[in-house]
Image (cartoon, rainbow, N blue to C red):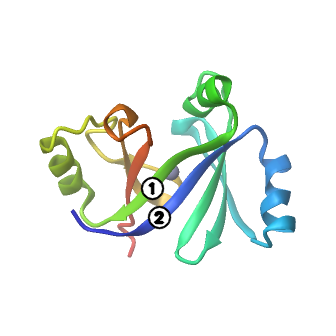
């Protein structure tokens, strides 16, 4: 397993248009991309903090994962994403160590990253994502 840095922190918000001003006007960050990820039923807004990004997630469907998260737990930190090398190998290694995977195969996330989630029941309650940038 080779983790280089925290790729992003995913934060569930009710509404991007209402959330972005906090990050821009109060924290002084700049939203550099807004992207819809149909697969995950979300619209995302990205900010950079050094090498790490903040990914705001607005649900486009109340039955989607972020819609359900907000209904059950309200707005807040949703997941933590690590940048890894060789995602397939990381998933195999993680599963071999007894961790439950949500995604046994990588899928496409925002910004063209290859991503996979580990199950929060296996990761002390923190929804954990691995990301690999194959364009590098
Ligand atoms: Zn993510």
Left or right of 35? Residue 81 is left
Q: Quadrant of residue 28?
A: bottom right
**Residue at the (51%, 37%) spot, across then down:** 39
Left or right of 113? Residue 77 is right
- Callout 2 crowding tier (Cα within 10 Å): few <14, some 14–19, many ≥20: many
Left or right of 88? Residue 117 is right
- Callout 1 crowding tier (Cα within 10 Å): few <14, some 14–19, many ≥20: many
Element carrying mark 1? strand
**Residue at the (34%, 35%) spot, across then down:** 102
* Residue carrying label 2: 7
**Residue at the (23%, 39%) spot, across then down:** 99
Q: Quadrant of residue 60?
A: top right
Q: Quadrant of the C terminus?
A: bottom left
Element carrying mark 2? strand
Q: Nearer the viewer, residue 35 or 123?
A: 123
The answer to whether marks 2 and 1 mark residues whose Cβ atoms lie closer than 8 Å is yes
Disc 2 to disc 1, C-alpha distance: 5 Å
Q: What is the x, y in percent for residue 113?
A: 43, 59
Residue 81 image label: 1
């Amino acid at each position: 397993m080779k983790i280089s840095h925290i790729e992003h922190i995913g934060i569930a918000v009710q509404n991007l248009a209402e959330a972005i001003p906090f990050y821009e006007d109060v924290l002084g960050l700049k939203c550099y991309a807004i992207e819809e990820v149909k697969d995950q039923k979300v619209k995302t807004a990205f900010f950079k903090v050094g090498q790490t990004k903040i990914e705001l997630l607005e649900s486009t469907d109340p039955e989607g994962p972020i819609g359900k998260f907000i209904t059950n737990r309200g707005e807040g930190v949703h997941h933590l994403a690590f940048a890894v090398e060789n995602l397939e190998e990381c998933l195999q290694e993680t599963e071999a160590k007894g961790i439950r995977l949500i995604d046994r195969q990588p899928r496409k996330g925002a910004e063209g990253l290859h991503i996979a989630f580990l199950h929060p029941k296996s990761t002390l309650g923190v929804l954990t994502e691995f990301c690999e940038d194959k364009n590098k």
